[in-house]
Image (spheres, rainbow, N blue to C red):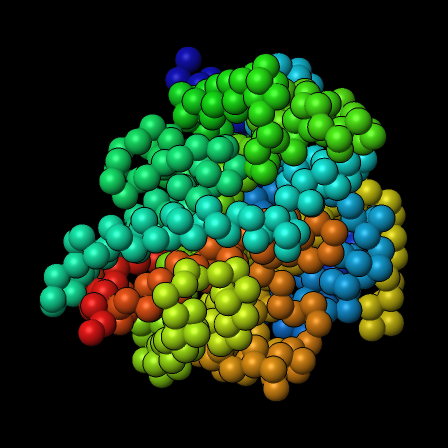
Amino acid sequence: MLLEFIALFIVALALAYRWSVSKYGFFKERGLPFAKPVPYFGNMAKMFFRKQSMFDVIVDLYHKGGNNKVYGIFEQRQPLLMLRDPELIKNVTIKDFDHFINHRDVFSTGEDDPHDMNNLFGSSLFSMRDARWKDMRSTLSPAFTGSKMRQMFQLMNQVAKEAGGCLKRDAVDGGLELDMKDYCTRFTNDVIASTAFGLQVNSFTERENTFYMAGKKLTTFTFAQNLKFLIFFSLKWLNKYLKIDLFDKKSTQYFVRLVLDAMKYRQEHNIIRPDMINMLMEARGLLQTDKTKTAPVREWSDRDIVAQCFVFFFAGFETSAVLMCFTAHEIMENEDVQEKLYEEVRQVTADLGDGELTYEALVGMKYLDQVVSESLRKWPAAIAVDRECNKDITYDVDGQKVEIKKGDIIWLPTCGFHRDPKYFENPKKFDPERFSEENKDKIQPFTYYPFGLGQRNCIGSRFALLEAKAMIYYILRDYRIAPAKKSSIPLELSSSGFQLVPKDGFWLKLIPRN
């Protein structure tokens, strides 16, 4: 019996090994160079065993590609065609976009029940495909125009002032040591609550309000959460049987109920608000306005509408906060940058007199824009971007015919390009002058893309930039940013998950200005 068990175990092990390496001949068959994979883990073993952050793994793989314009890597068993050439990236994202319309299909379950609210990511703009994506994108785009940003800025500015008031209450003469991640996520939480959901929330005074706590639970990536993501990415077939909920069920249900209740109340009372829920309701024909009388009605389910609000919160809560944190940290580490930026802040404040900060004044701050742009270069919001090929296409790459077939996954290594000395001299140095009026045109096109490229770029990038700039303006106006006892200098990235965060957190000291 024991021998039979051992024999079965060996056979099972052999079959598992064969399955884990079954796709590793992909690039050899295509005649393309590739990084040697490890069984099952592909080229991601260091990340899974917490030896390296995802960011550092991608940068290393990018440099490993040498002079190759197309370089093969494996995300576990999934072959990815990493593009290392700006011209090829231009082709994929712009010129031949009709061949690469979609992101790869990660979150769909293959079952399309419009009443199923368990997999909201699968119905989000990010995951939508083909005509459904185009339709939703065209509906949401007006929410992020300059005129809409002006309207949203008034709400954003109010939250920023409340956040500043919180600092003034807690500040002491010697300075205030602050966990910037906690502070910034409270700010982004309250901004999104107001601009997307129509809620007035103050997470600085009501520190454990339901909206904030639900959001924090959704965006805190535990070991179990990372394991779920692994199953979604590389063992998708298994999830069809396990039916794993990617996010905390109670928190997800809270947001579902919040959106559905708001929709019901607004429809019954014909309430109009300049936010995301309102726009989606108008497009679906649930609100009667002059605009909806002539506009085509979209056939969207409740899940489609809830999903857009859910993902807008998910992306805005974490990504925008991390941008603010990295920017503040770089300002703290680079005193010359801080002094120059403070001079601009001081000048804008003087020009405003007793008036409030305006949208025009904020977007007109050129050096602040340079600082945030450089922060996004060094610490991009999306460390890599993918595309799925939907029609066969062939490229001539240095005399070699490279065939990309339907179903192939293209990888655009954002952080690799941003850290390549070929495109950005001394890439580890924080240098906002790269984006000055004199220098920004020297940046080679398609080497800098912190929010993606082409028609599938991040729809909320202007919103995120506005948030970050408002936060930095108010902090520098009233405080000098200095190292705290817990500050990590230089920054060492955490290797414990997929998120771009430092190992020891974002700790700063804010010293009140006279």
Q: Looking at the picture, does residue 65 appear above or below residue 502?
A: below
Furthest residue toward bottom:
438
Q: Nearer the viewer, residue 436 or 364?
A: 364
At 68% from the left edge and 76% from the top edge, which residue is drawn? 444
Q: Is residue 45 visible?
A: no
Q: Nearer the viewer, residue 85 or 181?
A: 181
At 51% from the left edge and 44% from the top edge, which residue is drawn? 315
Q: Nearer the viewer, residue 64 or 197?
A: 197
Q: Quadrant of residue 33?
A: bottom right
User: In the shown orientation, is residue 365 left or right of residue 453?
Assistant: left
Furthest residue toward left:
173
Q: Quadrant of residue 438?
A: bottom right
Residue 158 placed where, x, y %? 40, 49
Name the quarter where the N terminus is drawn: top left
At 66% from the left edge and 26% from the top edge, which residue is drawn? 281
User: In the shown orientation, is residue 391 left or right of residue 285?
Assistant: right
Residue 268 placed where, x, y %? 59, 14
Q: Is residue 90 visible?
A: yes
Name the quarter where the C terminus is drawn: bottom left
Q: Nearer the viewer, residue 265 or 261?
A: 265
For the image, the number of numbered tags is 0
At 52% from the left edge and 60% from the top edge, which residue is drawn? 359
Furthest residue toward front:
354
Residue 500 placed where, x, y %? 43, 54
Q: Looking at the picture, does residue 33 appear above or below residue 209?
A: below
User: In the shown orientation, is residue 272 left or right of residue 490?
Assistant: right
Residue 317 placed where, x, y %? 44, 44
Q: Looking at the picture, does residue 256 appear above or below residue 35?
A: above
